[in-house]
Amino acid sequence: NWDETAAPAQQIDSHNEVNTLPTGQQFGMTKMQHDSIFNLMIQINWPKQSRTHTWDNHGGSYPKGTCLGATYEKGCPRLGSFTERAREVAILINRILMTNLRGANFHWGSLQLNENIVSEEHRDKNNEGKSIIALFGNFEGGAFVCEEDHLVCSKTRLWTVIDGRKVHRSNPF
C-alpha cells in the first residue's frame, strides 16, 4: 500500500487564491499511469521514518517513507534529503499529477511517499492549504479517512483533494 501526498507550496501572491479545489474532489489516473508510478516506487529502498504516529502494517520495526522536495522539520526549512535519490519517481508523479489536474489552480512543493504505513489520527504540520492523496499497489482493506470531511479513500488510480490540516488517519490493510 503506497500513500503519496502532494503537499502544497506556500502561496506566493496573497491576491491569487490557490488550492481552492473542493475537498473530496477526485481526478482519475489511467492504469498505465498508476503502474508506471508504482513500478518505480517499489524499486526504491525507502528510508525509515521517525514519525511517532505511524507504524509498518507488515510487521517491520520502522515505517518507511520520506518527503521529497520542500520540507520543514525541527524548526528548519530544507530540501528533503532523499529528493535526489528518488528524482525519477518525483518527476514522473509531478508530470502525471500536472496532466491529471490540467486547468486546476493547484500548487505543491513536496511529495510525501509512504510504504506500507498505517497512521493514527493526526493533523499534518506546516501545510499551507489543501493536499492531494493517492493510493498505489495491490492491497485489501485499508483506507485514508477524514471523518470531519466525510471522506474515505480506499481505491487506487484516484487523486483525491484532502485538507491534511484536519484530523485524519489510515485504516489497516
Image (cartoon, helix red, strand yellow):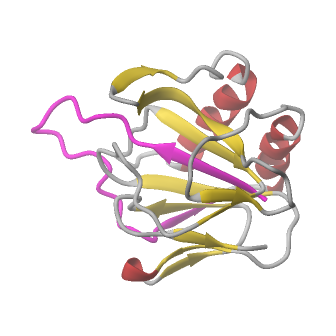
Left or right: where does residue 126 sit relative to residue 160?
Answer: left
Residue 81 occupies quadrant: top right
Residue 112 occupies quadrant: top right
Q: Is residue 81 above or below residue 151?
A: above
**Region of the chain picked out in magenta, as a range:** 1-28
Q: Quadrant of the N terminus?
A: bottom right
Q: Is residue 35 above or below residue 75?
A: below
Q: Position of residue 57 (x, y in %)?
A: 79, 63
Instruction: Look at 57% across and 47% down and name the residue there.
Output: 51
Main SS of the magenta part reads loop
Q: Is residue 70 above or below residue 101?
A: above
Residue 122 belongs to magenta span? no
Q: Position of residue 68 (x, y in %)?
A: 58, 29
How many labels were placed on the picture?
0
Q: Position of residue 40 (x, y in %)?
A: 84, 35
Instruction: Look at 78% across and 42% down and name the residue there.
Output: 37
Instruction: Look at 70% across and 58% down and name the residue there.
Output: 55
Task: Report the residue that reaches farthest toward the top.
Answer: 84
Please state which of residues 54 and 39 is positioned toward the viewer in this rendering: 54
Residue 117 occupies quadrant: bottom right
Instruction: Look at 73% across and 74% down and name the residue there.
Output: 172
Q: Quadrant of the C terminus?
A: bottom right
Left or right: where does residue 14 sit relative to residue 113?
Answer: left
Left or right: where does residue 123 sit relative to residue 97?
Answer: left
Residue 12 belongs to magenta span? yes
